[in-house]
Image (spheres, coloured by chain):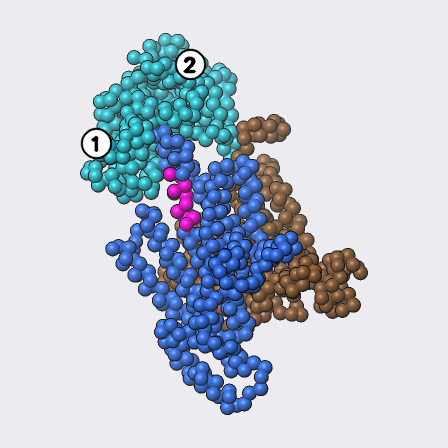
Chain colours: A brown, B cyan, C blue
Amino acid sequence: MNGNKKSVSKLKSFFTVPVIITSIILAIVLFISIFAEWITPYDPEEANLADSLCKAMEKGHILGTDKLGRDLLSRIIAGARSSIVNAFLIVGFEMIVGIPIGLICGYYGGRLDSFIMRIWDIVCSLPSLLLAFVLVAAFGKGTYSGVIAMGIVYTPLTAKLARSLIITEKSQVYVEAAKSLGYSDARIIFIHILPNCITTMVAQLTLDIGTAIVSMASLSYLGLGVQPPKSDWGSLLKDGMTMLYQQPMLLIAPAAAIMITSISINIFSDGIQAYIDPSQRRLPSFKEYRRKNKDAA
Amino acid sequence: MGNIIEMKDLCVNLMTVRGIVYAVQGVDLAVKEGEVHGIVGESGCGKSVSTKTIMRLHEKDKTEYTGSVIYNSSSGSEDILAMSDKRMRDFRGKDAAMIFQDPMTSLDPIMKAGEQISEVVRRKRGMGKKEAKEYVLRMFEKVGILPPEKRYEQYPFEMSGGMLQRVMIAMALSCEPRLIIADEPTTALDVTIQAQILDLLRNLQQENHTSVIFITHNLGVVAEICDSVSVMYAGRVVESGSVLDIFDRPAHPYTQALLASNPKASDSGKRMKTIEGAPPPLYAKFTSCPFAPRCPKATEICRSALPPVKTVSEGHTAACHLLNEGGKE
Amino acid sequence: MKYLSYAVKKLLSMIPIILIVSIAVFVLLRASGVDPVTVMIGEKQATDELRESLRQQFYLDKPLLTQYLIWLKGVIAGDFGIDYINKQSINDLIISRLPVTAGLVVLSSLFGMTFAIILGVVAALNRNKSADRILSVLMLFLTSVPNFVVSILVIVFCTKFVPGYSFIGSYSNFGEYLSRIFVPSIVMSLGVVAMLGRITRSSMISQLQAPHIMTAKAKGMDEFNVTFKHAFHNAVLPVLTIAGLQFAGSIGGTVLIEQIFSLPGVGGMLVNGIQQNNYPVVQILVLFMLVVYLVMSFVVDMLYAVIDPRVKLK
């Protein structure tokens, strides 16, 4: 009974006002990107020169249109789909490749570990954007080479995090206990150790989704990522740049989309971190504490 | 000889992540001029918190004080809790100094050992740079930091724990304070080094007639170095008296249990005695004797009312319901 | 003396990294399957003879290893080659574009460092008070708003509301040069300010709670001395290492900023090189940026060894 009540109040401490607001925003963004085809008011790729450069709310275009008369709102929604999907692909890549490598290196240590870490050090010695450029240059520009390039750039970081987490965990008594019971290494790593590191990793990976959205958008902005006629928020910005004087909405709308999503993800991840590590929470003053406790009583 | 420090009904409340901790709940304590006063108790009993109050070292907005801490000097009596910040700065170092438990972390890691003291005497005693250095070198020699010139230039990470504690002692003595508060100064050190540091402290204390408040949980150390002792439990002083009073005629059941759990050479082969249970958490103020749940002699009254402080004999007091004035149980 | 041998060792250890990366880049670019000759000729018609002569002129008929060695020999001799498209010397191109990029890196590092430390310390000293809360919201905002989006908004703002201010124009004197790169540098430094500011804050807070600060207070030092001589000095050391790496990494960030503000720097050259498959340019610029990055992190390492007595030089 008592324990139940406690876990409810713990969950309550996670859902602070900023976390609630950002979760709602993120849920909306996710919803939009999942159901993009069904909710776009117009075809995002269909040109209609008669409606070229409509202002906002003109001729039924809520955010107006671009030079080719394509509906901006529809393009933002379609862009959300590709920005979000690409971000998940990037993070999925770094998880699938990075986490096992990090766990194995950290768990076994030794030569394999120092060899892989040496490679990582060389990979990380290039500034991350620069590395992405080189990889895109090698794979040829385009959505998938952008995704893979970004995935490769972030993989060493994820692997390093997993490695450092498992190194602290593996000296714990429960790991020794599991070993003495004769469990296989794979079982110990994935069933016993991984769940203990999961919260820290989730906080980091949430943050990485935000970073991935932004990095992919920068690649597309430079014309190295998503290629026309497909678009994501980055390539929308690039298109908007050419119409800077005539139609600033073409810039402001995608910029706002990126900013709102990125800020929400950061606040949300901050919330997870504050939940994991209560020592960072602010202490109430004596006055506030007494007032609150009187209310409770 | 008068009292240099008198705490009167001192309460200290600390704000923590888990709520308010009533760390000190009405402490009365007097330290006589020129004596070594020991404060003994388990960890978390409020011994550190109450003595840090003398230097007002708690974070301002996370601490509440009530009661008073009187400091008597030739220029009269002052309440430390009411001192201005400026007077407090002056008080720290010149009137009272502190030696901390862990010398490894208590010195600035990126400042030369000698300079950490020279900084004090330059500011507090207005010495010039050269004069200060010479003074520090003499201090080093006095407390056994040899060779002084080499040690002056070393950083804390280049020295051993014992050497660092000597630096702390030299630092505490540098302005010739009237009171030194030593907060478990030997706990973090090896046993052989502990004895050296205790000898050094005792010698310096006798040489300068400094008053010392010595906090420890080690009864052996108390017997060796202290003149009088206060025993603390759950944020209050349960018994106070001279070393002889406490060790030979303990009046409070807690003191008795504490002494019984201190292993002696004659006990070899016997099972070690312990006090059942653990000290109570300090999230609330007590309305009954805090030791009652662990006390073998507890009665109804112990569980319903706070025990008053009773005089056992001249200079020997204890807070227990079961005592009659005069010390008869 | 110990610094010198440490420095030499560190510098020597960079050589294998540089070699490995340059080989990797060389091979990766060739692996993309684009024919350099087609890149050189572009849309124009060309005879087979012309193609063959170009192939010979750029050693493309030789095996890959030979091509690499020829290129490497040139680079070591200070000759970066000729680009595929304009057939110009890459040395001249880099030299003409270097001042903008260097200015961006230096200015943004200076701004970033100064603001981050000031804001971080102010936040730490006012921990949990309103100043701290406002700053932490600001920092959160700056971390999450991507640099290039801020740049775009700045451009929109300036074109709308600051008539006569342009990021595009001539660089005939130092004043013009500064005025062109000033705003981009500030924008570039924002992300760094947010990140370093947060680190400074938490580093400063943990230092203010460190036992040695209690000692400093107990020996009667005044607030200013405790805060700055003891707490700040210790707190700033980890910040400096991270700052150094950030600034070294900012050479990569210049690429975006230059592109957005249309600044004639090295970064724009790299992006164009990648888009046009202009390999000699990409190769040398990646190498160049890597070297700048490595040298900057080396300088940070050395500085750190000088300012922190605990760092042992191995």
Place of residue B272 in the rendered image (x, y in percent of width and height, measured from the top left): 33, 30
Magenta range is: C229-240
The front one of B72 and A32 is B72
Which of the image's four quarters has the N terminus of chain A? top right
The front one of B46 and A36 is A36
Place of residue A239 in the rendered image (x, y in percent of width and height, measured from the top left): 65, 65
Place of residue A50 in the rendered image (x, y in percent of width and height, measured from the top left): 78, 68
Q: Which residue: 61% across, 57% down?
A: C164
Which of the image's four quarters has the C terminus of chain A? top right
* Residue density around tag 2, few if under 14, some if 14–19, many if 20 or more, within 10 Å: some
The front one of C215 and B288 is C215
Q: Which residue: 41% across, 25% down?
A: B86
Name the element at disc 1.
helix
Magenta highlight: main SS: helix
Q: Which residue: 42% across, 61% down?
A: C293
> Which quadrant of the figure has residue B44?
top left
Report the disc number at residue B127. Answer: none
Can the viewer see residue A91? no
**Subunit of label 2:** B
Q: Provide the residue designation for mark 1.
A: B138
What type is the residue that disc 1 sits on?
A: Arg
Residue A239 vertical position relative to residue B187 in the rendered view, above or below: below
Q: Provide the residue designation for mark 2.
A: B309
